[in-house]
Image (cartoon, rainbow, N blue to C red):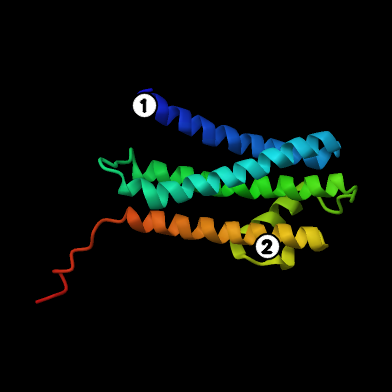
Amino acid sequence: MSLNSRSLFVEKWVIGNLLVAVIGSILVYSNPSISISWLLMIYAIVRVFEIVIYQLNVTLFDPLKPNYSIESGTRLLILLLINYIEMIFWYTIILLSIMNIKQIGTTSNWISYVTSSFYCFSTYDSNRMLANGDLFLSLVSVEIVTGLIMSVLSLARCISLLPVADERRGKK
């Protein structure tokens, strides 16, 4: 597989999974089918795990390989941010799926659950979570830790792409 076709595959994979996450969260919200909830929740868990492992590998271990290079720093950061947004929707699917499986009715609109997941993932604050209970508290804890890991990885990736500072400039 050539570099261009591999890059195109990666871009399609990331954008395709983002679309699946968005559509899946709408589907789980609007259709409380337990089998669909289980299917999408399992895929969401696998995808979140895959994203975290992949980002850890790309950030920590790929630069250690001989002849390591990236196609574009901008492309890399855009794909990372898409993964970040995608994970928010996967956590929304997990939350809504648990509610469907436990037969807890939704009390808010779809965007409120997405917003709740966004706040939990990006601000590390569980106070805005729309569901209560020990299982949901465990989910929130995992979501907060995952959000923190992704934030640190994103920051590390951005810093690693900055040009080297010329420290001679300030010295006379």
Q: Is residue 59 above or below residue 67?
A: below
Q: Quadrant of the N terminus?
A: top left
Horizontal arrangement in the rendering, residue 159 relative to residue 93 (left or right):
left
Q: Nearer the viewer, residue 126 or 67?
A: 67
Q: Amino acid at mark 2?
A: Ser
Q: Position of residue 81 (x, y in %)?
A: 50, 48
Percent from the top left, x then y, of residue 80?
48, 47
Mark 1: secondary structure: helix
Q: Farthest bottom residue?
A: 172
Image quarter of the C terminus: bottom left
Left or right of 2? Residue 163 is left
Counting other residues with Cα less than 10 Å from the Cα at mark 1, is it few (<14), some (14-19), or many (20 or more)?
A: few
Tell which circle, 2 or 1, labels the residue nearer the N-terminal end.
1
Q: Nearer the viewer, residue 163 or 39?
A: 39
Residue 78 location, x and y as percent? 45, 44
| Residue 157 seen from this side | yes
What residue is shown at x 33% (from left), y 41% (from top)?
70
- Residue at x-position 48% and y-position 60%: 152
Label disc, if present, on residue 141 of the rendered structure: 2
Q: Residue at x 53, y 58 (%)?
A: 149
Image location (x, y in percent) of residue 73: 35, 45
Q: Which mark is residue 4?
A: 1
